[in-house]
Image: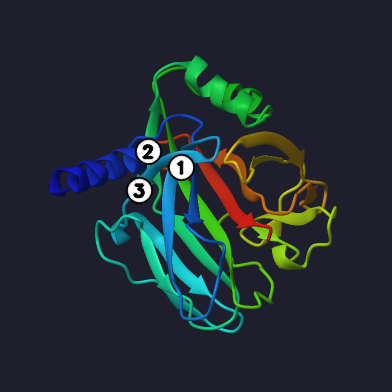
Amino acid sequence: MRLRSLSLVLCSLACLGQPVFGHESWVEPLKYQVESGDTVAIHMRNGEMFAGSDLAFFDHQLTRAELAGTDTTFPYEGRMGDIPAFTVQAASQGLMTLIVETEPAEVKYKTWEEFEKFLIEKDLSQIPAMHAGRGLPKQDFWETYSRHSKTLISVGHGEGSDTVRGMDIELVALSNPNGLENGAGMPVQLNAQSAPVPGTQIEVFEKAPDKTVTRFKVRTGQDGRSIVPVQPKHQYLLNAVIIRPADAGERAVWRTLWASLTFALP
């Protein structure tokens, strides 16, 4: 068991330090609907198609880890190396949000083809012209990236709402998953530093009760909003990526921001 725990921790460090291109990262509770007083285990994961490896809790790799209830927000204090990464007590009824942002990390693109594959997958079609216009090399260049994740958990009656949390990039649920009428979509908004991000792809991963996963895409409008088709008893992972020039003086030439949001319909 100790060897297994050590291997999981080492895997977590490797995944955070050197990600596989295009892989999502998200936080996912074992249960999305719990009762007041329950203990909730929440995984931090990296992978594809709503399935992936567990990442351990290391506070020095996070810039922010907070729990927000209907009227209070407080920092999360975990134990180094914990898997699942987060274990929280559902103290009061309402909609509870876990907010997680990681420290920036670096990755090197050895070839243009690696970077281009990523840009195509995330529908970042404007970047090749910007790359050429800045006179950047097409091989052996660096990028920094960070992950910005949220999950929504219903405690008891589950009333309340998601809201803008001031993350560098975030997906905001504009309706409570518990209050959606049958057949209605989930309205969401993509923000970067609290400002709407228009014309951007959102990947949606829909997990059915039998654990099969379907992937589809929506796009934000001029107000940064989109409607995601949803179904009862399904779980959802939403993922969006934006890229911008890195700050002057950095080794990296691009800064990539990844947003994710998970929730489930009762």
Query: Is 193 left, or right, of 110 in this rendering?
Result: right
Label 3 environment density (alpha carbons within 10 Å; few <14, some 14–19, many ≥20): many
Q: Residues within 10 Å of mark 1 (few under 14, many from 20)?
A: some
Left or right: 132 in relation to 82? right
Quadrant in the picture for the C terminus: bottom right
Residue 186, percent from left and from top:
77, 55
Give yes or no for contact between labels 2 and 1 (Cβ–Cβ under 8 Å). yes
Q: Which residue is mark 1?
A: 145
Q: Residue furthest left?
A: 2
Circle 2 is placed at which residue position? Answer: 106
Q: Tell me the element at label 1.
A: strand
First in residue order: circle 2 vs circle 3: 3
Residue at 42% of width from left, 54% of height from top? 43
Q: Please name the amino acid that badge 1 sits on.
A: Tyr
**x, y percent for residue 52:** 44, 39
Could you tell me which residue is drawn at 75 percent across and 49 percent down? 230
**Does residue 192 sit above or below 33 in this rendering?**
above
Q: Quadrant of residue 192?
A: bottom right
Q: Amino acid at mark 3?
A: Leu
Query: Does the rendering let one see residue 77?
Result: yes
Cα distance between the residues tagged 2 and 3: 18 Å
Q: Are marks 3 and 1 in contact (CB under 8 Å)?
A: no
